[in-house]
Image: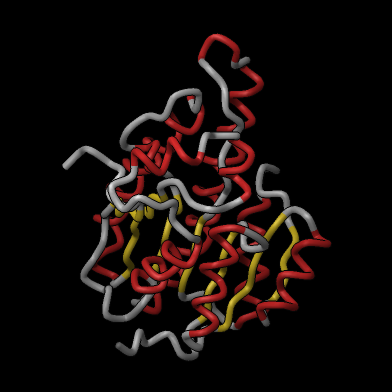
């Protein structure tokens, strides 16, 4: 299938490693021009050189940074057709041990950076009557995961925003969807120090996902043929979620 991404442009936040890097790689393979953003400028530069992407360094937890990155991407690429919001996961922790500062930091880094980037990208997409917004969340947004209080709480809210926003922009041929990775072989999984053998026993597919598994779904949702899919939260989890 031709995904119709040749000559399209995309910005992938958190694109220097893990899921973001995999999504950027597949979009480039489909012919899109891609800019990637990350906080670590050294890792970002290396990833951009490897992928053939534009590098835009920024700390998205800083108020206003997400808006600036979108503007820079539009300038560098000429326009922005696809926005992939990938902010990474907040630190683990139970409710009793999380401070007000932990909640505020997670809110700025995960929630407000997402809102800022989307708000900056939408006007031009709506004016051109074509756009794709993909928000990478987590299966924790639908079924809470133990010890991930911040992620469980804030990502579920993002799903509400995705669905509500999709209704506002659908008439302008802009889609807004959430993508939920399950347990995937990334640095985030290593940071959580989970028992991989136990995880695999819980996944019906009997394996942990790869970034490439996830990126394939992202590429389709960014494509022309996916123009009638909007307001959805789609899991790529090997059947892990129990909910319908």
- Most foreground residue, 240 or 134: 240
Which residue appears farthest toward the left when viewing the image? 244
Residue 132, x across and y down, in percent: 39, 69
Colour style of the rendered protein structure: secondary structure
Using the rendered view, name the quadrant where residue 11 is placed.
bottom right
Q: Residue at x 64, y 39 (%)?
A: 191
Q: Residue at x 38, y 55 (%)?
A: 179
Residue 104, x across and y down, in percent: 61, 26
**Number of on-image labels:** 0
Using residue 211 as the reference point, say whether residue 177 is left or right of it. Answer: left
Using residue 125 as the reference point, say whether residue 110 is left or right of it. Answer: right
Q: Residue at x 57, y 49 (%)?
A: 87
Residue 142, x across and y down, in percent: 31, 37
Q: Quadrant of the N terminus?
A: bottom left
Q: Residue at x 27, y 80 (%)?
A: 225
Using the rendered view, name the quadrant where residue 71 is placed.
bottom right
Please tell me whether residue 87 is drawn above or below residue 51 in the rendered image. Answer: above
Please tell me whether residue 141 is drawn above or below residue 136 in the rendered image. Answer: above
Q: Quadrant of the C terminus?
A: top left
Residue 108, x across and y down, in percent: 60, 37
Which residue appears farthest toward the right when viewing the image? 42
Using residue 85 as the reference point, say whether residue 102 is left or right of it. Answer: right
Using the rendered view, name the quadrant where residue 193 is placed.
top right
Which residue appears farthest toward the top when viewing the image? 96
């Amino acid at each position: 299938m031709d995904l119709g991404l040749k000559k399209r442009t995309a910005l992938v936040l958190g694109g220097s490693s893990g899921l973001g890097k995999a999504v950027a790689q597949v979009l480039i393979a489909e012919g899109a021009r891609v800019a990637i953003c990350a906080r670590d400028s050294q890792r970002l530069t290396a990833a951009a050189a490897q992928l053939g992407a534009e590098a835009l360094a920024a700390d998205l937890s800083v108020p206003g940074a997400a808006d600036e990155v979108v503007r820079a991407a539009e300038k560098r690429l000429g326009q922005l057709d696809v926005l992939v919001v990938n902010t990474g996961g907040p630190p683990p922790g139970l409710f009793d041990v999380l401070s007000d500062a932990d909640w505020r930091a997670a809110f700025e880094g995960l929630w407000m950076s997402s809102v800022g980037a989307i708000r900056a990208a939408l006007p031009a997409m709506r004016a051109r009557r074509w756009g794709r917004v993909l928000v990478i969340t987590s299966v924790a947004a639908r079924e809470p995961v133990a010890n991930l209080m911040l992620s469980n709480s804030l990502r579920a809210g993002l799903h509400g925003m995705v669905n509500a926003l999709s209704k506002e922009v659908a008439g302008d041929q802009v889609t807004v969807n959430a993508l939920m990775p399950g347990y995937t072989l990334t640095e985030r999984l290593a940071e959580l120090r989970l028992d991989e053998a136990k995880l695999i026993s819980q996944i019906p597919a009997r394996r942990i996902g790869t970034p490439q598994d996830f990126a394939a779904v992202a590429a389709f949702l960014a494509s022309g043929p996916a123009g009638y899919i909007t307001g959805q939260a789609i899991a790529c989890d090997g059947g892990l979620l129990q909910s319908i």
